[in-house]
Image (tube, rainbow, N blue to C red):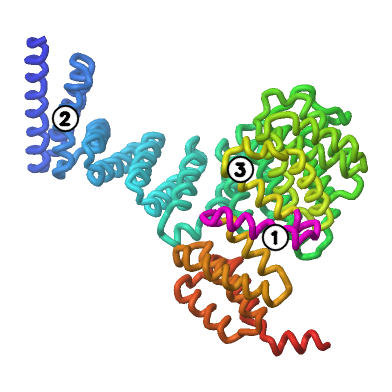
Amino acid sequence: GAAADMTADLELACLESYVAAWQAAAKAKHSTEAAARQEQAAELIGEIDSRFGRYWSRRAEMLLAGSVARGGGTENLAVLVRAAESLFRSGQFTQSLEAYDRAARQAAAANQPDAAFNHAFTAAAIEQQLKKHAAAAGRFRQLALGAPRHNRAGEAHLAAIYNSALAADKNAAAAYDELLREHLAEWPRSPTADQVRLWLGELCERERGWSDAIDAYRGVRFDGPQATAAVEGLARSYRRWLADLSAAGEATAETAARAAKELEAFVVNSRGDLPERWSRLERIAAVSAATIYLTYGEHEFARAERLLRAALNDAADAPEEWRTTAQTLEVFAVAAQGQRAEAAKLLNDLAGGEPAQMFGLIEGLAKVAAQAPPKVARELAELQLRAAKLLGDRLKELPADQQNSFRRARLRALVMIGRHAEALQDARKLADESPRDGQMQEQYAELLLESTDRASQQAALAKWRDIGRKTRQGSDRWVRAMYAQTLALTNLGEQQQAERLIKLTQAISPELGGPEMKSKFRALATRTPQRESKSSSK
């Protein structure tokens, strides 16, 4: 009530007198008296907090904070920390940061290592909150390496890595890889180590270092919270590595066998038994192993089917996307064993369900086909077309975007099995029907470009020019359109125009859409009618 407020006001007035006395003593260089007044102030704030609550203690802390912010020196750690907290709450972040730094130094001088570490950690966290990520990264790293055996050292170093990844400073960003490896060298068994292994795996993936990525994911404890993400990363890295090997015409059998067996080991026990109750991790591992067996194995179709059947038998609570993928692969596994009637039955069973389920199957087959070697891709395309035929008139029950996605997938399947003329005819019709569907327009233009006759190349050039004009300059689609026009001009023997178009594209988009597109442009720049005619005459 009013009496309590009056008493609290008196206590605040008393605190003001302590602060004034402390400042006067400090100014007169009477350090003993200044320290005594600081101690009295700290004890009084504690009393105000316990007797009158946080409102009044906050007001008291603001008095202290004002004194500290104005340069009032204090050797009292409790006073300094309360002032730092109050400065932070009031938005005076720079002053709060300075106060926490002073608190950390004083705690270290007083032989209080835990307090020193925690105050320095808070100071670094303020830099992070202010989005000064390079500075925060430096603070956290220095703190961790300065006290590597502290129980929060791994946490501090993890924060250094996080801030390094976010830093706009190029030097801090370049140190990201070094920090990841430093963490694992210094704190390999820390609770933070598995998160770092995931980040290292992702970094290696971005750099296409598949073997290093696999080693990083493999190091994660598979009974810990990061286990599922690690299995996903392991499977993804193996798939992309195999796709690269296949695209380069290199052998895949040994790597594929090792990958599938490693993933299968998460599912099969020492006796070769499969689980009765399946976890999310086991489902991911089973589908990933089956995908590799089916895509790159030679005689592993039955093995893949066994995994998929067992997983689908306990799939009542599985996500719909996973179930669709597993069913897609099961159809493929059965068909690959020559059991066409059984595969047709599985497709028919799926066709009796919701149209969305069949659509998911077709999309799933398309995804697998996109990464598969040509022979496997053709088999998958045949299955896609069979599934598309079963969907039939029920396609109209799907949303418009799914209908268009289905039509594009069907066109790709036709091309895969060599029915290019039919795909081109259908694409022309669909492009006319959907003039605002950019993906459909691109697909029609791509099919024209893939045709070998001169008329199709001229039509492709016109179509890609139209796409380029209707697309924002510098965007990914615009760069693709410029590349396609350059390719069409080259195919038509218009090399000078092609070279001018490359220069124009580079002037507007210096990176040419990224490393992959830049490589394609460079390959085109080396092609000339003379070189091609010489090479063809040899």
Q: In which quarter of the image is the C terminus?
A: bottom right
| In-front residue for pair 459/368 | 459
For the point 53% across and 57% down, which residue is it? 435
For the point 22% across and 44% down, which residue is it? 95
Q: What stretch is highlighted in magenta?
A: 414-438
Q: How crowded is mark 2: few (under 14 residues within 10 Å), some or many (20 or more)?
A: some
Answer whether labels 2 and 1 touch (C-beta < 8 Å): no
Mark 2 and mark 1: Cα distance apart in space: 93 Å
Q: How crowded is mark 1: few (under 14 residues within 10 Å), some or many (20 or more)?
A: few
Q: Quadrant of the N terminus?
A: top left
Task: Residue 6: tell me if it is visible.
Answer: yes
Asked which quadrant contains residue 234, the reply is top right
- Residue bearing mark 3: 402
Discs 3/2, front: 3
Mark 3 falls on what kind of element?
Answer: helix
Where 498 sits versus 91, above or below?
below
| In-front residue for pair 366/13 | 366
- Dot label at residue 425: 1
Magenta region includes residue 273: no
Where 430 sits versus 189, above or below?
below
Asked which quadrant contains residue 62, the reply is top left
Magenta region includes residue 434: yes
- Which of the two labelled residues, at mark 2 and mark 1, occupies the earlier sequence position? 2
Mark 1 falls on what kind of element?
Answer: helix
136 sits left or right of 302 in the view: left
- Residue bearing mark 2: 36
Q: Which amino acid does label 2 sit on?
A: Ala
483 sits left or right of 112 in the view: right
Counting from the top left corner in percent of width and height, residue 233 is at 66, 45
For the point 47% across and 70% down, which residue is it? 509
Task: Residue 76: tell me if it is visible.
Answer: no
Asked which quadrant contains residue 411, the reply is bottom right
